[in-house]
Structure formats: C-alpha cells, structure tokens
Image (tube, helix red, strand yellow):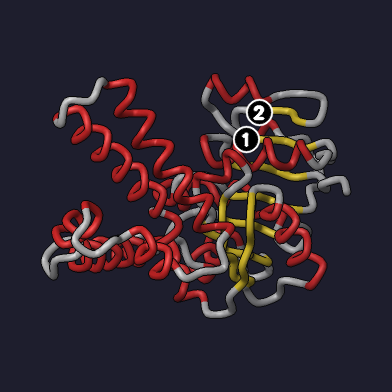
C-alpha cells in the first residue's frame, strides 16, 4: 500500500529512518523541510527537500505532517506549519512536547498524534507508543499507524501521561543497551582480550540475546535464570550486578531521571 503524501519536518537521524521505512512501502510525492545541507541527500523522485517552510508550494496538500525536530525548536518551527491544521494530521515524535502545548502553536483545530519511537527504527526494529489527541479521526489514526508500522512495532495508549515513562524506557532505552555493550567491550580488553575480539563478543552477545528475548515465549527472568548455574561464573557476576545498590537501584534512578526530564521538555 502506497504511503500518502507526507510533509516531513526534520530529516535527521529519526526522520531519515522513518523516511527510509516509508520508501520501502512506496511513498507518494512528498516534501521534507530541513536546512541542513546533508538533508538534500534524501531527495529523490518521491521526495523534494526544501530548506524552509516558505519554499513549500501552496498547492502541496499532505495527508500528514510529521514533526521530527528537536523539542527545543518546537516554538519557532510549529507555527510555520499551522496552515495545515484542519487539513492534515500532525504526527509528532518530539520528546516531552504535549498535545495541548502543540495545539497552542498550531491552532485548536489541529489533529495531533503524539508518538515516541526509538532508534532501532533505523533497521525497522523499533518500537513506538502513540497517543491520539482530541479530533483525530479513525482514518488519521490508521494513517499514523501505517507510518509508524513502517519502522517497527506500534502500541497505542489513551493516557498521554504514559508517554513520559515510555520515553524513559524505550525512547532512551537503546542508549542503555549500547552502554552495556560499550562497558563489556572495555572490560574484555582490560581482561586481556584483543580489541577486535572484545568488540565481537560484546556486540554479538547483546544482539543475540536481544533476538532470543524477542523470539522467546519465556519471561526475561526465566531466560536469565536458565543461564545462571548455581555457584558458576554467571552467578558470581550477577551477585555484583544485582546487589541492592547496583543495577536495581541504578536503573530505578536512571528511568526516573529520564521520566522527569521528559516532563520538563513540555516547556
């Protein structure tokens, strides 16, 4: 099924990942707005790239306006696209920016879906949680669902407040996993392994474990226990990592901090 015409505002890492996913599903003639010179590399028969909103042809009528700019730039960017309120659905992937706050910038008639994807979208393995605002029609929700399904799995909630902890868990979560791989690699080198072997072991262990977790019907706890022989090496490591002041406490603090920051970004 062809993806309807889109106005993509911001063609950075996440915007570019979404664009790649849409193109795999056949994208109708669309426009991206991004002043960065490298954004022009995304241009093609299905996409015109312009540096600013004033360069968008008056005749262009997108089905959706995807807001993929930094949340700190919302106040200056969103009003430039307010003319599409009442005509297109706005799909925002800006962390922290609330539907009410965006409507104040776009106008009360703006139909807005707020969503939080994550960076595995780049390999179509992302997970996104989305929340529809007042006035979003079933057809507009279906369109947003199709746009997000192109980059991975999608879940919907009706309580917008849940998107703050979602941001902390899945939005920021890939960085936690990358940090784990980074630290495993560093410590492997300190234990005497060659750097290339250390990198292979750390990355493939994290990637393979993620695939096993994604495809297994067992709980993550059961998978962990299955690797942990009594009195073995894994048990010795987990005694350190699962100490009350280690991973359990640190993960609690980390997710709480990210949740608070997401709420602060609402402005």
Q: Residue furthest right?
A: 1
Earlier residue among tags 2 and 1: 1
Q: Secondary structure at mark 1?
A: strand
Task: Between residue 116 and residue 181, name the one nearer to us.
Answer: 181
Q: Residues within 10 Å of mark 1 (few under 14, many from 20)?
A: many
Residue 50, labelled with which disc?
Answer: 2
Give the residue at x 68% y 36%.
20
Q: Is residue 251 above or below residue 192?
A: below
Q: Residues within 10 Å of mark 2 (few under 14, many from 20)?
A: many
Residue 260: quadrant of the picture: bottom left
Task: Between residue 157 and residue 84, name the one nearer to us.
Answer: 157
Circles 2, 1 touching at the beta carbon (< 8 Å): yes
Q: Residue furthest bottom?
A: 159
Q: Is residue 149 above or below residue 9?
A: below
List x then y, in percent, for residue 43: 71, 24
Pointer 1: what residue?
33
Q: Is residue 75 left or right of residue 260?
A: right
Give the residue at x 22% y 56%.
232
Quadrant for the C terminus in the image: bottom left
Q: Residue furthest left?
A: 245
Q: Is residue 205 visible?
A: yes
Give the residue at x 59% y 70%.
131
Q: Is residue 165 visible?
A: no
The CA span between labels 2 and 1 is 5 Å
List x then y, in percent, for residue 121: 57, 45
List x then y, in percent, for residue 64: 73, 53
């Amino acid at each position: 099924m062809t993806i309807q015409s889109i106005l993509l505002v911001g063609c950075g890492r996440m915007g570019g990942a979404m664009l790649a996913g849409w193109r795999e599903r056949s994208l109708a003639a669309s426009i991206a707005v991004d002043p960065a010179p490298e954004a022009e590399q995304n241009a093609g028969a299905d996409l015109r790239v312009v540096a600013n909103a004033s360069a968008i042809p008056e005749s262009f009528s997108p089905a959706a306006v995807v807001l993929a700019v930094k949340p700190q730039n919302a106040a200056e960017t969103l009003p430039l696209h307010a003319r599409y309120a009442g005509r297109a659905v706005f799909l925002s992937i800006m962390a922290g920016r609330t539907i009410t706050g965006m409507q104040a910038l776009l106008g009360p008639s703006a139909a807005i879906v707020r969503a939080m994807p994550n960076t595995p979208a780049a390999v179509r393995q992302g997970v996104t949680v989305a929340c529809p605002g007042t006035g979003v029609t079933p057809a507009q929700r279906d369109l947003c669902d199709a746009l997000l399904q192109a980059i991975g799995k999608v879940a919907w909630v009706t309580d917008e407040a849940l998107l703050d902890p979602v941001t902390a868990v899945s939005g920021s979560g890939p960085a936690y996993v990358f940090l784990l791989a980074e630290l495993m690699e560093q410590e492997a080198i300190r234990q005497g392994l060659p750097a290339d072997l250390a990198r292979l072991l750390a990355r493939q262990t994290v990637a393979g474990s993620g695939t096993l977790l994604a495809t297994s019907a067992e709980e993550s706890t059961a998978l962990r226990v299955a690797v942990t022989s009594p009195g073995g090496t894994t048990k010795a490591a987990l005694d350190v990592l699962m100490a009350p002041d280690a991973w359990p406490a640190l993960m609690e603090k980390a997710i709480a901090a990210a949740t608070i920051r997401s709420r602060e970004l609402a402005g």
